[in-house]
Amino acid sequence: MKLFFSRLFFFLITLVTSQSMAQSDELAQKLFKAHSTFKEATLTQRRFKQKDILPLISKRLGNPMYTIEKVGESFEGRTIQMLKVGTGKKKVLLWTQMHGDEPTATMASFDMFNFLEGKNDGFDSFRKELLEKTTLYFVPMLNPDGAERYQRRTMQGIDMNRDAAARQTPEAVILKGLVDKLKPDYGFNLHDQSPRYSAGRSPKVATISFLATSYDYELSINDVRQRSMQLIVGMNKILQKYIPGQVARYSDDHEPRGFGDNVQKWGTTLVLIESGGYVGDPEKQYIRQLNFMAILSALGKIADNSLTKEKRDDYYDIPENGRWVYDLVVRNATVRQAGKSFTTDLGINRNEVSYSNATKFFYYSKIEDFGDLHPQYGSQEIDAQGYTIEKGKVYPTTYKNVSEISKLNALNLLKEGYTYVRLAADANTRALGLYFTTTPLHILRSGQPAPSGVPGLGNTATFILKKGGKVKYAVINGFVHDLDNFTAEKGQGIVE
């Protein structure tokens, strides 16, 4: 009889857990599908500034759902605001853009506000539970000075996420003050990371990465940190259905200056979320949707306490972030140099260059590795087996301006091996510095020499790949053009 009741108890626990997980999956799926309904329409690209979100905060001043509070000022005197919503006992503090160029979760935060304001759409019971059991405190842009310039650091040049101990920045003082005043039960430290991190040693880019920050060098696990791990385990299960194999975690080495580590030490269960890369999503709109779904799902688990059903050890099954991915890898290319031949791989990254007051960017691509890259991967790859890599030729005619060059038949030039076109000495482009063109050519200003020899380490990623004397591929500024399947609108040329 004792054995019977023991088995019955185990069965009921398993049944309840399975039902809870099924409900969690169903909610996440509904949130994912409904995101477009709540997506904040005024935020369509990631290089926005504080002036773009201030009207979104102001329009909620008369809404009784919210308490909106000025919590301080940035180094340059920009007002930093916090929005409070909900009346529950469990307090959750969420902050975004402590690094000014990490805005994905800021976009998702305003999507979440739109969601919380909704009604009669199938989510009412979830909203009711969330707002009655939790109080949410959002700081949607902690580093507005950095966001103004689309830069990581504050105006003082300090990384705020390494300023939890010294607190030399006013922004760090604000965050520490909020933690002390609110004593939140949970915190979400919301970031973006490089789109070139991999999920473990794999070709898959880490789209979302997590960290249950450690509060000491021994990497101890108390109840506070355990809850972080359990929340992450729950979010990972949800995300695997949408980005399978593309969730990673950071090494939990203790960083005594980091806010995540210290907030955890100060008694708040802290989850750090990093939005990485997803191929074909340069503006991170799909990743924004994943943030919306995953964070709301996690808040639901906090509200109903279902996070305690997750196994903390599953946290360590999430692969660590790796550095195994380039934007482009060219494999097995033949190089002819000094009368000899050898094969090599090239690792190429496309780096963003800001312009138009940091509201826009173009790509400037470099060859960042050259040699055997068999352990590495590319988000895009070319198998150049049997192809010879060469630098392109400079077209003999010079042109007055970039507009003249844009009228050229780029395909014909590339087929003939011309990748470089030169501007005349009086061309009025020098003041622009490094710049771009949508024409798929590499434009040289007067006096700017074309690279000599085989394209190699540190060079701008412009070259051709030939077989049997025919140009098959032209790589211009790190973007691949298949000359047998050419589309000129893909041009990401560069002006040097």
Image: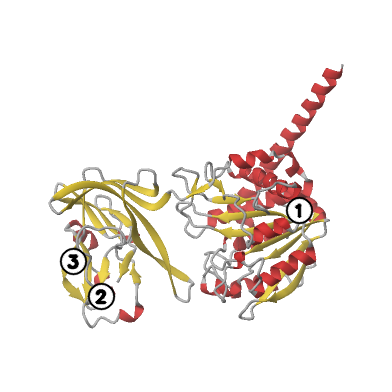
Judge depth for marks 3 and 1 and give the one in front: 3
Residue beneath disc 1? 127
Q: CA distance from mark 1 to mark 2?
A: 59 Å
At 68% from the left and 52% from the top, the residue drawn is: 296
Please tell me the numbered disc located at residue 394. Answer: 3
Does label 1 or label 2 sit earlier along the sequence?
1
At 32% from the left and 46% from the top, the residue drawn is: 372
Residue nearer the viewer, 65 or 335? 335
3 and 2 marks in contact (CB < 8 Å): no
Q: Secondary structure at mark 3?
A: strand
3 and 1 marks in contact (CB < 8 Å): no
Q: CA distance from mark 3 to mark 1?
A: 63 Å
The quadrant in which residue 59 appears is bottom right
Type of the residue with mark 2:
Arg
Please tell me the numbered disc located at residue 445. Answer: 2
Tell me residue 375's x, y (percent): 39, 43
